[in-house]
Structure formats: C-alpha cells, structure tokens
Image: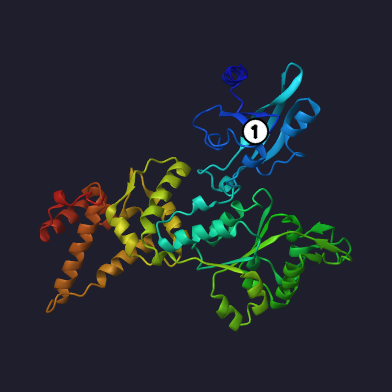
C-alpha cells in the first residue's frame, strides 16, 4: 500500500528527483527515479542492500534516515552529500519522513531534489566526480592487468607511485584507486607540485599559524584537508630535495607541525604520487631522494604509452565521438576508416590527451555526421603528407614523374574524404575547374573514389 502511494506521489511532484524507502533495519526497500532518462543516480542495484553499504559515506550520525528513526520527526530540505559504492558523489536536498505502523516507526521515506551530478557534456562539472576503474577504456592486456591491480591495491593504504609519459592517464589511475578504496567517501586532494613555488610548498602542504610570518593566518594545509582520504602529489620530482626530506618525515610519522606551530597535527592520509619521468633517472640527477622514492613507491604502476597499445586507439576514438557528441550537441556517427588508419599509424607523442585534443578539434570543424581528413588539425595533415613523401620512388623515375605521382596520390586521398568535387577543391585550395583538369590528366575516375572513407 505504501509503495502505491509513493508511485502516486511521484507522478504529482515533477520537481522531485528521487525516492528511497528504508526500513528500521536500514535495508533499502524501494528506490526510484522520477524521469527514466536521468541516469545520475544508480537505483537498480541498491534495493535490498543496507543503506550504509550502498552509500558508504553515510553513518548513524549524519544520515537523515537514522536521525528520523531516533526522533520520529521529519527532516525537511537538508543538503546532504551522497557517495555510491562506485565513488560517484552527489549533493542533494532531501526531506525524510517517518513511516509508522500502529504507532511504531518502521522506516523512513526520503524525497530528494536539486541533485547535482557529473554530466558527460560539461567538462567543468565532470571533474566534480572522480574517475573509477570503469573509466579506463582499453582492450590492451597490460592495461587490463593495471585495472585488476587497482582493485587489489585499493583495499589497503600503502603508498602508491604512478609513472608514465604525459597524457597517458596517470590521474585517471590515481582517482580510480581512491574511488575503489574504503576512503572513497572521504576527501581526494590533488596537488601539482610543479605549479607551487618552493617558497610556498611547506605552507601549502602543512598550513600556517597566524603571526608565523607577515600576513600569515591560521590555515589548514592540504594534508589536513585530505585527512581520512587520499592526497595525490603529481610531479613529485619537481619538489625541492629539502622539502622532500620534510615530506618523508610526515609520510613516516603521519603527523607534522604547521608553519609557525608548536604542536603536532595528526593525520590519516594515503599518499599517491606520480611523475612523468623515469624515477631512477630522477634519482641519478638528484631530483628525487632515493629514500623518499622507496617510501612512496611501495606499490608501483607504470602506464604504457598509447603507441604501445595501438588497439586502444579505435576504442578511444569511438569513446570521444560519444563524449563530444554529448558535449557539443552534435550527431557524428563515425570517423572515416582512412582517418582511423592514419590514427593507427601515428606515434601519439602526446598519448591519450593528444588524441582527445585532436578529436575535439575535429568536432569543432565537422558539419556532417562523420569526421573526415579535412576536419583534423593542420599538423596532422602535414604528418600525412610527410608519410606519403617518405615513400621510395620507383627505380629510374624522373623528378617530374615522382612529383606527378605524388600529386595524383594527394588528389585521390582528398577525394576519398570529400563529399563533393567542390569540397575536395576547397580542401586542395584550387578551383573546381583546375581539379577536374588534373583528374583528367591523371585519369582519375572520381565517381569510384569520392567519399569512400567511411
């Protein structure tokens, strides 16, 4: 009977986003979304679960369910943080009411509205939610081993060091570790050490006491802000070796003094660090203390570059097509197969970040339902031309013959990615008439070539 009444209630109040009903044993008996197309809160797998298992950040002290069960009084419009088992986090405004049966409170009924969530079409909002292991898109054996390793090491608190070239996805791995850990409902604080001047590093890490120097105020450092959670120190080798010595002491003791302070601050923080150079080379160059490296690298992850996992390129391309379709409100269906071949041949010195930027650039240029060669950045077009020029000419060919063959190849490749002769001529920066002349000269039957990349 209660369930039916909830369904009626749901149909009346359009501004309500979600419902949840929990019994006196803290078991979720009902959970529903108002609009089926909203997918920002997972309701399918929580029914039958303990409330505090489904949402690990909730406790008997902070959950509205527990407080209503204790007092029997409703709680109206309270802002609350909700974190799922996956690490997804939401800020909601919730109202929780007691459910009574013959004068006994047998559970609570919760109505939530004004939820905030990670939207895939908003980059700024998307970073309000941390990556999870499912965010790692791969079919590569080594990367799948890394995903498996993430789930293993997430269960404990040992320090982790992640190494790899810029753009390989080190931050993604770091966030996935936190999201899968018991600390997922606690703070995740990230600091790029290269962006902090040496003179400010100590106060940034440990905080300050008012009056310790001119302008100093009582301020928490990021260690204190991360208490109970995870502290990610990126480009750790950019920190001065003197500061590294102080950091080592804090990592060992899990306590420190603020700048100008006279008493210790105790913290419970898991340290994850990262660097985009070989740590052993950094040690040789005195950029990284050997003792700090050993302490921070109890568990190590080495992220392979994209050029060594080429089979991931098509998967990532398809992922970015979906991502930018939603972000830019476009309807691109595919990337020309010829362009995908170019992507597969390319070495990707900027790794996944470079591929993402190339796809974003192409989405800005495309006007149809496909990404074609003419949409990619200029440097990529130059790369394609260089690859064509590196082909060895036939033995005995004259310069004129080599240039003619080269021009013919360029015209054919351009026709493949064009929808019309006018578009191909514009891409080649010649007139349509001039293009038709050259096709006749090289005996190119454009009807069999035009638009064949796809």
* Residue 429 visible, this angle: no
Q: How many marks?
A: 1
In screen coordinates, is 70 left or right of 121? right
Percent of width and height locating residue 24: 71, 29
Q: Residue at x 17, y 72 (%)?
A: 402
The answer to whether residue 103 is above or below residue 266 is above
The answer to whether residue 289 is above or below residue 120 is below
Percent of width and height locating residue 211: 89, 63
Q: Quadrant of the N terminus?
A: top right
Percent of width and height locating residue 182: 65, 52
Q: Secondary structure at mark 1?
A: loop
In screen coordinates, is 344 left or right of 163? left
The answer to whether residue 224 is above or below residue 305 is above
Render colour scheme: rainbow
Q: Residues within 10 Å of mark 1 (few under 14, many from 20)?
A: some
In screen coordinates, is 262 left or right of 44? right
Classify residue 156 by image quadrant: bottom right
Classify residue 117 by image quadrant: top right
Q: Which residue lies under the disc numbered 1?
A: 27
Percent of width and height locating residue 354: 45, 61
The residue nearer to you, when weighing 153 against 316, is 153
The residue nearer to you, when weighing 412 against 255, is 255
* Residue 149 visible, this angle: yes
């Amino acid at each position: 009977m209660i369930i039916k009444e909830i369904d009626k209630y749901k149909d009346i109040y359009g501004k309500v986003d979600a419902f949840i009903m929990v019994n006196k044993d803290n078991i979720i008996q009902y959970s529903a979304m108002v609009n089926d197309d909203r997918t920002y809160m997972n309701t399918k797998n929580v029914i039958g679960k303990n409330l505090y298992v489904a949402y690990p950040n909730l406790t008997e002290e902070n959950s509205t369910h527990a407080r209503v069960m204790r007092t029997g009084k409703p709680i109206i419009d309270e802002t609350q943080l909700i974190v799922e088992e996956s690490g997804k986090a939401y800020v909601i405004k919730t109202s929780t009411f007691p459910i009574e049966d013959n004068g006994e409170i047998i559970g609570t009924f919760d109505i939530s509205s004004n939820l905030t969530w990670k939207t895939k079409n908003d980059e700024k909002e998307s970073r309000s939610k941390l990556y999870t292991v499912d965010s790692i898109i791969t079919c590569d054996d080594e990367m799948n081993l890394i995903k498996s390793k993430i789930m293993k090491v997430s269960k404990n608190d040992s320090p982790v060091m992640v190494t790899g070239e810029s753009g390989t996805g080190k931050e993604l791995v770091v966030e996935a570790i936190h999201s899968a850990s018991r600390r997922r409902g606690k703070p995740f604080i990230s600091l790029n050490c290269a962006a902090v001047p040496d003179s400010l590093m100590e106060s940034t890490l440990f905080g300050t006491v008012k009056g310790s120097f001119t302008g100093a105020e009582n301020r928490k450092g990021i260690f204190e802000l991360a208490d109970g959670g995870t502290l990610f120190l990126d480009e750790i080798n950019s920190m001065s070796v003197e500061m590294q010595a102080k950091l080592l002491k804090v990592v060992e003791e899990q306590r420190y003094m603020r700048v100008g302070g006279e008493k210790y601050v105790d913290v419970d923080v898991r340290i994850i660090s990262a660097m985009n150079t070989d740590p052993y080379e950094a040690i040789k160059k005195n950029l990284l203390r050997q003792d700090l490296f050993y302490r921070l690298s109890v568990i190590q992850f080495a992220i392979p570059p994209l050029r060594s996992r080429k089979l991931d390129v098509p998967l990532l391309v398809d992922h970015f097509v979906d991502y930018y379709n939603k972000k830019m409100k476009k309807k691109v269906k595919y990337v020309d197969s010829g362009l995908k071949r170019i992507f597969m041949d390319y070495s990707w010195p900027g790794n996944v970040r470079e591929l993402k930027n190339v796809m974003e650039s192409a989405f800005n240029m495309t006007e149809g339902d496909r990404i074609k060669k003419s949409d990619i950045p200029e440097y990529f077009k130059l790369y394609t031309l260089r690859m064509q020029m590196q082909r060895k000419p036939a033995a005995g060919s004259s310069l004129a013959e080599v240039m003619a063959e080269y021009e013919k190849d360029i015209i054919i490749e351009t026709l493949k990615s064009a929808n019309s002769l006018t578009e191909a001529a514009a891409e080649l920066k010649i007139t349509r008439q001039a293009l038709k002349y050259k096709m006749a000269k090289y005996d190119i039957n454009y009807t069999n070539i035009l638009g064949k990349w796809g």
